[in-house]
Image (spheres, helix red, strand yellow):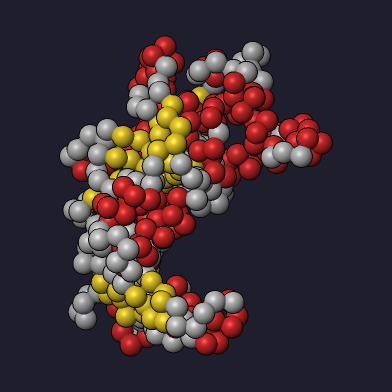
Amino acid sequence: MSGYLNYRLTGEFRDSSASQVGYLPYDYKRQAWARKRNFKWRLMPIRPEQLPQLIAPGEIVGALTVAAAGHLGLPAGLPVLAAASDKACEVLGSGAMSPDTACLSYGTTATVNTTNPRYVEPIRFIPPYPAAIPGHYSTEVMIYRGYWMVSWFKREFGLHERLLAEQRGIAPEQLFDELVDSVGAGSMGLMLQPYWSPGVRQPGPEAKGTIIGFGDVHTRAHLYRAMLEGLAYALREGKERIERRNGQKIQRLRVAGGGAQSDAAMQLTADIFGLPAERPHTCETSGLGAAITAMVGLGIHPDFPTAVAKMTRVGAVFHPDPASQALYQQLYSEVYLKIYPQLESLYKTIRRITGYPR
């Protein structure tokens, strides 16, 4: 865990309270190790003295030791500051600081997050993890495979683009935008649900990826566009779940991660969500979020709102196209939202018959 890395850097066994994602025995509501009588201590043979001292994002972990400084080529005594998990830093670096602003992450795992001062479970019994702002929470819904699907498509169907990109000295993903732009909104009725890796509760562990609506008019380009549309549909569904749980509408949309560098993906996101899709000025929003916590911790900026205002800005903005938005709204409400409920029992039957792995 990151606490051990901090120990090697500073000699102090400390860690950020906002780096504890998926760990037990952590109390997500209190953002501290669980109290002595909490049942979590009985789930594994861990004692309190084996765990690092937790400090808030922006606090100083310690000073860089001479040995660590020699390995890194940095001055000994340099302060090491607590930050947060990669996603929490990405949300902060995107400028999403309140429940009315959502950050979509188009990374290997695609997510939709809001920052909230209240503890709100986006899915019951799935806790929000600590935000990079002390005392705040990140309400997250994730699509586990997410933009990994782009790599999957590139491997399975993108030989032409890979060879052409190698000749031109560019990334194959640049050519995939041409595939998206060659097909109209809605992929001529080809619909994809991106559960290439199922969820824990929503969807359940029996869920599988689905593509419906194939016809002889469809090509690789339709499949690729349907894949990006399916991811956006799934994240919109997650956004609406977060809105219901937070009791607040999302008014702004920031889109980060490697997939956000695609103009085609940004435009169809704006069309499917019905909101302007704002791309941060840098693709390195996770690193920027960590830098923001450091600037606040060192007193260079007095607080997080000031640091975010000074250190982040919106780059390109993609506005919904009215005709595409209307088409996507029909496909989302009348088709996409009905796919999983109608196929759930069939997924369970597939598992029973074939022994499909959990």
Quarter of the image holding residue 307?
bottom left
Residue 227 visible here: yes
Total numbered circles: 0
Q: Quarter-wise, where is residue 125 in the image? A: bottom left
Does 126 sit left or right of 111 as displayed? left
Q: Position of residue 181 (x, y in %)?
A: 59, 21
**Residue drawn 37% across and 28% down?**
276
Instruction: Give the residue displayed 58% in from the left and 76% down from the top.
Output: 72
Residue 331 shows up from this direction: no
Residue 58 against residue 198 in the figure, above or below? below
Camera-side residue: 338 or 167?
A: 167
Q: Residue at x 42, y 75 (%)?
A: 80
The answer to which of 291 and 227 lies nearer the viewer is 291
Expressed as whole percent of the image width and height from the top left, the position of residue 219 reads 66, 20
Could you tell whether 228 is left or right of 158 in the image?
left
Which quadrant is home to the N terminus?
Answer: bottom left
Vertical arrangement, residue 45 with respect to residue 122, above or below: below
Depicted 38 relative to depicted 124: above or below: below
Residue nearest the observer in this picture, 321 or 109: 321
Asked which quadrant contains residue 161, the reply is: top right
Residue 11 image position (x, y, % from top left)? 44, 87
Image check: 18 left or right of 118? right
x, y percentage for residue 284? 50, 50
